[in-house]
Image (cartoon, grey):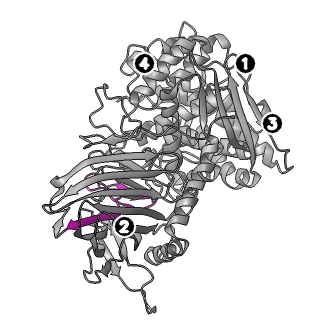
Amino acid sequence: MAAAVPISPKPVSGARDGELPAFVSNGLIGLRIREQPLAAGVAIVSGVAGLHPERRVEAAAPAPYPLAADLAIDGVWLSDQPWSVTELEQSYDFASGELTSRFVFAAPGASVRVEVLTFASRSAATLVLQEIRVIPDRPCDLVVRAITETAGLRGRVLERRCDTPGEPEPVVDGYLLWETEGGLSRCGVALHTEAFEGDVPRRAVRPWDESGPLVTEYRGRATPGAPLGVRQMAALVPSVVHARPQEEAVRRLARGRQTGFETLRARNRAAWDELWKARVVVRGAGAEVQALVDAAFFYLNSSTHPASPAATSIFGLAAWPDYHYYFGHVMWDVDAFCAPPLSLFQPGAARSLLDFRSRGLDAARANARLSKRAGLQFPWEAAPLSGQEASPGEGSGAAHEDHGSLHVARAFALHADITGDQAFLREQAWPVLRGVADWIVSRCVLTARGYEMPRAMGPAEVPEPPDNDASTLMAAGQILRRAARAAEQLGEPVPSTWLETAGSLYLPVRADGAIAAHDDFRIDEPKGATPSPLAGYFPYDHSGPATQRQRTLDLYLARWRDYVGTPMFPALYGVWAAMAGDRDLALTLFEEGYSAYDSGRFHQCLEYRRDHPDSETPAGPFFANLGGLLLGLVLGYTGLVIDDGDPRAWARRPVVLPRGWSAIEVDRLWVRGRAARLVARQGADRAELSFDDPPSGTG
């Protein structure tokens, strides 16, 4: 059995000095928490969008920070003397999703040690919780203020109340109705606080201030043996899920208050225990590799939730003021690299990603029509609220990078095949597969060479789009065939144009037999080392001559040094080397293509390697990279090819792992509604996907 206890990152101490702050999330709410955690960080709520202050496009917009606080020793306030803080420490328990922070705050008459526990509830997704313990070194007067902070945000408070209309006593400390800049969306925020330790302090809520923060204050006399403890519980609800989110936030918070802090904490730990049953264990790789795998699993699962209304962006729900974080837009990388493993780990969360795309069908249909094409063309950068195209400026990617819709369609097909959910196949996957298949046919042009796709930019973003991007065409053929299979499954007619186009797609091939990235391709051209044709073999499964596959692998693997350091594809290099049969190169490329992207502070995988010339600002956790790692571990090295057939026949290739690795094991993947165990042993003819329970007969 694979061990279910993950390796948590090493504790950190001192100032960040430019490193990323801790990221705590449950998939609906994401918090960036400073090393001094009482100072307001950044809160992102799924579906809360406003106008970006610089680019003026729809973007994820910060909400009021719900768990800020301040404290005073004998009248000396921490916020007035932040330089009086020492001994900063933080530790992150990946097993439970709990962040613990400690620091010392010194005033002239006394000093206090402060311990802060923070987590985002998975069992009650609208809630984030925090516990503050203040331990003085000598008797003193202490004040702790719990604050829902609005300072520095772009937007406005539309409503602020500290009473509950019609109730003799307030249900919660107070609530805010926040509107983002541009009035694109609103967010309800409600706060509850309670003292839990030491002598009962005097409590006061600031009822005044129509547009300011929520503030609840606790005052008391504290001694070393009687510290002051205050708990904060906040609910955040986006208007995309409720028309009056401030009222729903109060209701959700009232439930949380009745449940209680300790019970919510226990339920959150239990939820994480369940998720970690899908832990990906890499035998023989060593603790450092396993720690990176655990971190990737943690951040992907913590940033997704069945309750999320707006999928997740390429950085999850993480943001920080020093980088654009792609404006919180939903991009194809999430569909290509994150949705497939999530369908196996946490199918409800994967469904929420796909539900976002389903809600955007009208936008995708309009997008195709504007370009005189049929079917569905999903946005290059989908806005988190409207689901419409939101690429800033001239939108060159939106104009020419046509492969994005293919990855969306594939994510729907894989989820249908993994879950066996026939209702999902008919109601959600089929409209997407049919629409994207129609779009492919309308996008292609028939020539003497076959069906071609002119001016189609692949993942290598260059100024002038080339003709016949190979990775796009390889993926298009598979989507057309999968759409035809879905039609057969559902008893729908199969348009003859789908299979005719799939069977006659033109692929550019070099004189040496390797697939070229596009027409007139030169390996020494700008971005010529981009290994996009290899993506046609994995994550896709292009069928072609074995000699052609080997020559294509050899061509692009030989130039890995010219590409590694950039985002996305480097996480897959190890898989491609293993497919080529080179275990030593597979290990090297795992280290160079993923390990080297690690940020030492809580293992937040960066977008770019720090030594890459385009790495101006470290930004993470980057989901194309960590999702690519998990995708490769579960489906790539193991040789699984998912279809609508018997899952026990999904293993299609011999198992080849990086040098030193002996096996990849996952104790529980969700397949067709059943718990499955995956074991891929180095050198085995096939990986093993087994079920302990008999099939239910529901498919």
Specify start and end residues of the magenta stretch as a single range.
Answer: 45-73
- Element type at mark 3: loop
In the image, taking residue 450 as reference, residue 64 lies left or right, namely: left
1 above or below 334?
Answer: above
Mark 1 vs mark 2, CA separation in Å: 56 Å
Question: In the rendering, which numbered label is found on residue 229?
Answer: 2
> Which of the two discs, 3 and 4, labels the residue nearer the N terminus?
4
Mark 3 vs mark 4, CA separation in Å: 37 Å
Depth check, mark 1 against mark 4: the one in front is 1
User: Within 10 angstroms of label 4, few (less than 14), some, or many (20 or more) residues?
Assistant: many
- Quadrant of the rendered structure where residue 64 is? bottom left
Mark 1 vs mark 4, CA separation in Å: 32 Å
> Which of the two discs, 1 and 2, labels the residue nearer the N terminus?
2
For label 1, the residue is: 684
User: Residue 535 in the image: x percent, y percent?
Assistant: 55, 27
For label 3, the residue is: 646
Magenta stretch contains residue 58: yes
Mark 2 vs mark 3, CA separation in Å: 56 Å
Depth check, mark 2 against mark 3: the one in front is 2
> Which of the two discs, 4 and 2, labels the residue nearer the N terminus?
2
Depth check, mark 1 against mark 3: the one in front is 1
User: Within 10 angstroms of label 1, few (less than 14), some, or many (20 or more) residues?
Assistant: some
Magenta stretch contains residue 610: no
Mark 4 vs mark 2, CA separation in Å: 57 Å
